[in-house]
Image (tube, rainbow, N blue to C red):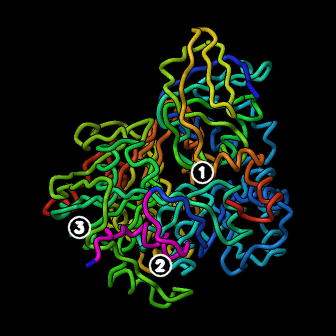
């Protein structure tokens, strides 16, 4: 299924404190309430821009560096972020995103400008930049992760199989 | 004659825990020896377990939850999360470390929950700390942590290994924190992403277990999955009387294959400081000396151990913290607090003007215990200086060794601690 949304572009090394500051993450387990603070220290308007009609968060290298907080992918999901597209990802964030059901795509984000409309079809492995009329290649997920995402995340995988079935 | 290449520490630990001939790049499902969560991550893990329909943990003796990040609770939201963790402990039998016990990354090794040769995961990125005692330990998110608590196993990609050798000897006034900051400065925040680090060399051999933990703790700051060291006689002596199981030290094979090898001459490394707002923004102290500071912080899973408090107390004894500076001290555990009281370090620090706070994470994560004001500079022994990290995105955090922090709070400005060593005024 293809998702179409606008690109919101940021830089390299976006850490988990930018995605959701520690001062909020410890306050509650209510992700809907915390999502309004997503990306706040980098772009105070992120939530207001993305929430109404969804968006792709586009970044440079090492997206999600820092802490293990799963609140990071969760607040992005709850702010209506459809996927994160970056040149590379930090390891823990990458796993957390798959486990919680946030699609992550490693690709050359120099081919995307802020505000471009993009179309992403994960199953087909196709990413189109509709604004520039180009197709951007990306590597498929490792098979284990593709299976977890297909099952709807790690919790759903466990419910379905009664444990690990990878 | 075998031509099969040897294995790194990581490959050997994953082989032993997965029952396979694990090599870098392989995906394995491996048994874990321990699972840990803290108060910022455990509530989501508990919710994930509920959603999985799981009501028990795989082995209550191999699961612990720790209230350290926001503890004692500063607000009612956190109080509710702490209550949830206590109830989880009662229901499942998992070990609960309540407020005041200390930082998870001190408590887990200090209480012998992990031993050399183990594989463990923790819902906190600095779980890599126990690599210093030959444990493949790595940070995971709450859902991965929940799966490990439920099944006693998790899937892993066996990492490539970068070998980091420290030759030479440390100069007086230079510490393990400076060694790992020098590494971050050289390879950057993603210099070892997806890899394990293996630290060795005469400088590592000469360090105490406390000082080694400082280095492994910061493996994640270069993106690494683990920061491993061999278990030597010092490690095994440290485990006397505390290991819950017998250590099974794992050395790398002599012909292990490393993806990269780096060598540092420690003799040429002086005190290092990470400048705002990233850990790899590292300078020799000379470049930042004289920068005014309003707050100092000594503590955390990086540098809140007994040796760190001793280094700071030795500098501050008989001196005073600058009148324009607050110095906050958070011992990494209750045991360290007791030992530091016994040794007189706490008296030295408090008499010099330090404020002692609860054993735990202190102000590191910005939830309590000393949020800086707008425009203020902080010199801290922590491992992260991201914008907003200490609770105010308009403050500036510099990272250094306990000696650098102690020297700086006396002057009210970032100060080279070497003047207190080897023939200096100390």
- Mark 2 belongs to chain: B
Query: The N terminus of chain A appears in which quarter of the rendering?
Result: top right
Residue depicted at x 72% and y 25%: A47
Q: Mark 3 and 1 residues: CB-CB less than 8 Å, in contact? A: no
For mark 3, what is the residue? B201
Task: Determine crowd level at label 3: few under 14, some 14-19, many 20+ residues with C-alpha closer than 10 A.
Answer: some
Q: Classify B183 as above or below A114.
A: below
Query: Can the viewer see residue B99?
Result: yes
At which x and y percent is residue B420?
22, 59
Residue at the limit of the structure toward the front, as seen here:
B1
Q: Tell me if I can see residue B109 in this picture.
A: no
Is residue A38 or residue B393 the one in the foreground? A38
Q: What element carries label 3?
A: loop
Identify the magenta region.
Answer: B2-24
Whether B341 is drawn above or below B48: the answer is: below
User: How would you rate the neighbour count of disc 1 (Cα within 10 Å): few for under 14, some for 14-19, many for 20 or more?
Assistant: many
Q: Distance between the residues labelled 1 and 2?
A: 31 Å
Residue extending furthest toward the left: B423
Q: Mark 1 lies on which chain?
A: A
Helix, strand or loop at mark 2: helix
Same subunit: marks 3 and 2: yes
The residue that mark 1 highlights is A68
Camera-nearest residue between B384 and B93: B93
Residue at the spot of label 2: B339
Name the quadrant of the C terminus of chain A: bottom right
Q: Quadrant of residue A74?
A: top right
10 Å crowding of disc 2: few (<14), some (14-19), many (20+)? some
Q: How many marks?
A: 3
């Amino acid at each position: 299924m293809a998702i179409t949304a606008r690109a919101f572009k940021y830089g390299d090394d976006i850490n988990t404190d930018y995605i959701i500051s520690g001062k909020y993450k410890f306050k509650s387990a209510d992700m809907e309430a915390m999502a309004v603070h997503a990306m706040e220290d980098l772009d105070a308007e992120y939530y207001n821009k993305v929430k109404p009609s969804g968006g792709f968060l586009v970044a440079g290298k090492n997206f999600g560096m820092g802490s293990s907080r799963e609140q990071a992918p969760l607040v992005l999901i709850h702010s209506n972020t459809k996927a994160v597209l970056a040149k590379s990802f930090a390891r823990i964030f990458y796993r957390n995103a798959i486990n919680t059901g946030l699609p992550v795509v490693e690709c050359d984000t120099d081919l995307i400008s802020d505000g471009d409309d993009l179309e992403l079809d994960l199953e087909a492995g196709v990413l189109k930049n509709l604004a520039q009329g180009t197709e951007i290649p990306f590597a498929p997920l490792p098979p284990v992760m593709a299976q977890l995402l297909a099952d709807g995340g790690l919790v759903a995988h466990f419910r379905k199989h009664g444990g690990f079935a990878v | 004659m075998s031509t099969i290449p040897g294995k790194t520490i990581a490959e050997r630990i994953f082989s032993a825990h997965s029952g396979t001939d694990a090599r870098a790049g392989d995906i394995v499902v491996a048994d874990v020896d321990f699972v840990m969560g803290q108060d910022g991550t455990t509530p989501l893990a508990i919710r994930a377990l509920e959603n999985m329909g799981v009501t028990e943990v795989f082995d209550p003796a191999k699961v612990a939850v720790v209230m350290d990040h926001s503890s004692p609770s500063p607000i009612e939201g956190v109080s509710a999360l702490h209550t949830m963790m206590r109830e989880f402990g009662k229901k499942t039998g998992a070990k609960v470390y309540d407020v005041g016990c200390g930082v998870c990354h001190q408590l887990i090794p200090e209480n012998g929950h992990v031993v050399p040769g183990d594989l463990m995961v923790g819902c906190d990125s600095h779980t890599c700390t126990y690599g210093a005692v030959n444990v493949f330990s790595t940070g995971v998110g709450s859902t991965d942590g929940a799966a490990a608590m439920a099944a006693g196993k998790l899937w892993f990609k066996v990492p490539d290994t970068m070998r980091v050798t420290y030759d030479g000897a440390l100069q007086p006034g230079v510490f393990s924190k400076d060694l790992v900051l020098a590494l971050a400065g050289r390879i950057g925040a993603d210099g070892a992403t997806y890899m394990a680090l293996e630290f060795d060399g005469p400088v590592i051999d000469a360090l105490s277990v406390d000082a080694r933990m400082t280095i492994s703790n910061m493996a994640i700051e270069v993106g690494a999955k683990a920061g491993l060291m061999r278990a030597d006689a010092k490690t095994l002596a440290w485990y006397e009387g505390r290991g819950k199981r017998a250590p099974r030290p794992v050395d790398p094979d002599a012909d292990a294959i490393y993806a990269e090898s780096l060598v540092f001459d420690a003799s040429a490394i002086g005190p290092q400081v990470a400048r705002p707002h990233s850990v790899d923004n590292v300078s020799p102290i000379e470049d930042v000396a004289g920068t005014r500071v309003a707050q100092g912080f000594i503590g955390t899973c990086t540098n809140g151990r007994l040796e760190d408090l001793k280094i700071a107390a030795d500098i501050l004894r008989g001196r005073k913290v600058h009148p324009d500076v607050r110095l906050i001290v958070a011992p990494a555990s209750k045991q360290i607090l007791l030992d530091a009281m016994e040794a007189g370090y706490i008296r030295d620090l408090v008499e010099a003007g330090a404020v002692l706070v609860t054993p735990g994470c202190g102000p590191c994560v910005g939830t309590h215990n000393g949020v800086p004001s707008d425009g203020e500079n902080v010199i801290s022994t922590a491992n992260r200086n991201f914008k907003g990290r200490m609770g105010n995105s308009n403050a500036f955090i510099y990272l250094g060794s306990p000696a650098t922090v102690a020297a700086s709070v006396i002057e009210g400005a970032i100060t080279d601690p070497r003047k207190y060593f080897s023939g200096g005024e100390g």
